[in-house]
Image: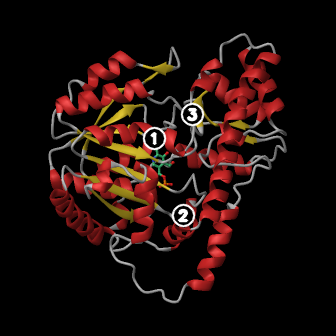
Amino acid sequence: MFSQLQTVATDPILGLMAEYKADPNPNKVDLGVGVYKDEQGHTAVLKCVKEAEALRLKQEDSKTYIGMAGDLSFNAHIEKLAFGPAHQVLLANRVTTAHTPGGTGALRVAAEFIKRANPNATIWVTTPTWANHISLFQAAGLKVKEYAYYDYDSKGLQTEQMFADLNTIPAGDVVLVHACCHNPSGMDLNFEQWQRFTAIAKERGFTPLVDMAYQGFGSGLDEDAAGLRYLADNVPELLLCSSCSKNFGLYRERIGAVSIVAEDSKVAEIARVNLLSVVRSIYSMPPAHGAIIVSHILDSQELTALWHQELAEMRNRINDYRQLIIDKLAAEGVSQDFSFITRQHGMFSFLGINKAQIDRLKAEFSIYMVGSSRVSIAGLNHSNIDYFAKSVATVLK
Ligand code: PLP
């Protein structure tokens, strides 16, 4: 039976990672993979996580199952973090949350939940979007369509086309919107655009699905959730998928959450049992470790303060390097306008260079980025930024 299988193309980012690893050039630079790296090029465990893990080791007295919704204390914390502690949807008991194996697990559970609610739903994603969005929704049996989003010419949003596309989407469909730090473009909706998005969602009656994989990486924890909070204030229902991979640095622990906001508490209760039955039929119960670490951090004022500080360090480092890219390229005599980089947020931006230039950067300078010219800004540091700027300037000449 297995010999009938056809081979499958590997994710281009994984291929790029393998090439980078095998490259003997001591000056090599990895701008491919979407994980935060510090000034030493290291993805360190956060100090607040280390402290929470020490506490867990001391306190843990059982490894019994935790239940389909996962850790309830984590779920309450993550709802407050996303919506703000006194949001009307929380006060009215309109939200139900399950913690999931990562943001990816949250998206897959959301997809299965959508299919139960409306088997004919199409899910609309931004052009472009995180590549895994498309494959994971299709794998769940949902139809996927795209709406206009990033404008490769102006390096901003295709604002009017985006709203025109959204204005064609019917009730019963789902529209995925990135809460902040759009992957792969870094280009986010501003508040006025969130208001327009919300008005269209209300008028057309489609259901928004907010993917929040980078809360705190853009402008701040509250700032990055402002669009979501406004949306939740104004539409009857939405789905939220969040992730603690980036903002808590818990990548491999696989911790995220899916939250359903329903029109009232009665519908939320029906949503809750459906959500749990979806979870039961996929992986039964989520892994506990990451959720309990986040819970310990958010239970403690001291650890929360430390987390805020460490998160701000990561955010500020990325934002500093966004400015540095512009300054260093200008210092190398590049006349092309790269100012868009500081108008974008989070881990990624498209450099906007062509395929031949990307290939040359890899072949001649061992600088690795995805074929779309998406760069992971956190791959830059004090010891490679000058080399990066010089190399980019050379291929742009
Ligand atoms: N959503 C987006 C937009 C992402 O970029 C990612 C990760 O890169 C995820 C969701 C899922 O994150 P994870 O499953 O690692 O928590």
Q: Earlier in the sequence, mark 3 or mark 1?
A: 1
Q: Closer to the camera: disc 2 or disc 3? A: 2
Observer-nearest residue: 238 or 171? 238
Q: Pointer 2: what residue?
A: 298
Q: Earlier in the sequence, mark 2 or mark 3?
A: 2
- Quarter containing the N terminus: bottom left
The percent coordinates of residue 379 (x first, y second) are: 70, 42
> Which residue is painted at 68% across and 60% down in the image?
46
- Residue 229 lies in quadrant: top left
Q: Is residue 36 visible?
A: yes
For disc 1, the marked residue is 130
Q: Give the colour scheme shown.
A: secondary structure
Q: Is residue 52 left or right of residue 115?
A: right
Q: Amino acid at mark 1?
A: Trp
User: In the rendered structure, which amino acid carries the disc numbered 3?
Assistant: His
Which of the two marks, 3 or 1, is nearer to us in this view?
A: 3
Q: Which of marks 1 and 2 precedes in the sequence?
A: 1
Q: In the image, 330: left or right of 161?
A: right
Q: Amino acid at mark 2?
A: Leu
Identify whether 40 is placed above or below 164: below
Residue under circle 3?
Answer: 345
Q: Residue at the location (42% across, 86% down)?
A: 64
Identity of the residue drawn at 26% across and 70% down = 281
Distance from Cα at disc 2 to Cα at disc 1:
29 Å
Could you say where residue 247 lies in the image, as x and y percent from the top left? Answer: 57, 52
- Measure how far apart labels 3 and 1 are at the Cα level: 15 Å
Ligand 1 within 8 Å, label 1 CB: yes
In front: label 2 or label 1: 2
Say whether residue 291 is left or right of residue 301: left
